[in-house]
Image (cartoon, helix red, strand yellow):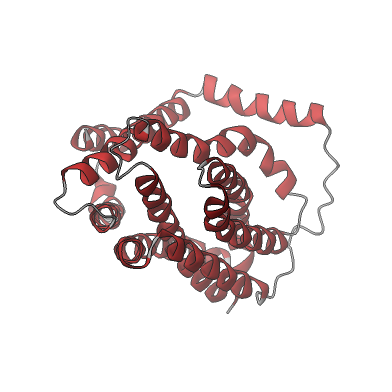
Amino acid sequence: RNFAALWWGQLISILGERLTYLALVGLLAEHTGQFAHERSSVLLSLLANVMLASVLLFSPFTGAWLDRWNLRRVLVITDFLRSLLVMLIPVLYAMSGHTGPMFAIVFLMFTCNVLFLPAKSAITPELVPPQQLLAANAWLAGAGIIATAVGALCGGWIVDHWGWQTALYINGVTYLVSVVALAIISYTSTRGAVKLPRLSLRDYLTEVTSGWDIVRRNPIVGLGLTALAAVWIGGGFLHVAGNQHIQRSASAPGMERVGVLMCMIGLGAAIGTWWVNTRGRRLPSGWLLGVGLLVVG
């Protein structure tokens, strides 16, 4: 029952998040005349960087805090804050006619996300027995894939027919649904018997330094992070150039085509995840990673 509440809440919440991405791109498309303005590339790049900035700034420090907090409370509060923030975007844009407030709110939303995602990962082992943890993680990953495919298709249509403002309001409601689902989880932390000491700034710096030492000394970890960085750099180009290309070259500009593209990415992720975890298990992981990156390139 507890895991079902987490799963359904995440399915609906992630579906709403896909609407938000399309709505934000739709906002920028409207603001720049379907990306005809010369500054459209800069605005798209700024959106991607604002989304990543909070991750780069705060992620190294969140784990130490989360170890000392009630995880369900973190999930409920961050989802509630994201609901309020996402519904502020159309209000502030209508008042100012400027994209600045939108970028500030997106930064705050992804700051909440920096706390939400590791808390969700940490609470899952406390909701299911150890022998069901692998299946639980697979179901959560499946929720993300399903939400990406469905949310992208629906989101593009909603933005084109009902407006990007409506898509953001819908996302606000999906966050509230997730809040209700998370609130009904019967949760008692299994870590309560372990009293962790309070952390000082020096302790934070020590933990961060230890993490970088692992990256520096372990070539496998370094390779994994390098490959991830390459994928994210490629995704950055796709985010900027792909959106502009679709809007400029289509006979009738709109976000539905971007939604279809995102749906294809979601379906490809589903097929790739299934294959890697079935037949792909027989192949050396290094070769699989290298060939996969070449195919993507």
In the displayed structure, does residue 78 sit left or right of residue 297? right
User: Is residue 135 in view?
Assistant: no
Return the x and y of residue 38 as percentages of the image width and height.
32, 30
In the displayed structure, does residue 127 sit left or right of residue 297? right
Q: In the figure, residue 19 lies in which quadrant?
A: bottom left
Q: Please state, as top left, top right, bottom left or bottom right, where the N terminus lies in the image.
A: bottom right
Q: Is residue 251 above or below residue 104?
A: below
Q: Is residue 157 above or below residue 203?
A: below
In the displayed structure, does residue 275 sit left or right of residue 251? right
Return the x and y of residue 278 as percentages of the image width and height.
27, 56
Q: Please state, as top left, top right, bottom left or bottom right, where the C terminus lies in the image.
A: top left
User: Is residue 247 in view?
Assistant: yes
Q: How many marks?
A: 0
Q: Nearer the viewer, residue 221 or 270?
A: 270
Q: In the figure, residue 84 lies in which quadrant?
A: bottom right
Residue found at x 51% / y 66%: 169
Return the x and y of residue 168 as percentages of the image width and height.
48, 61
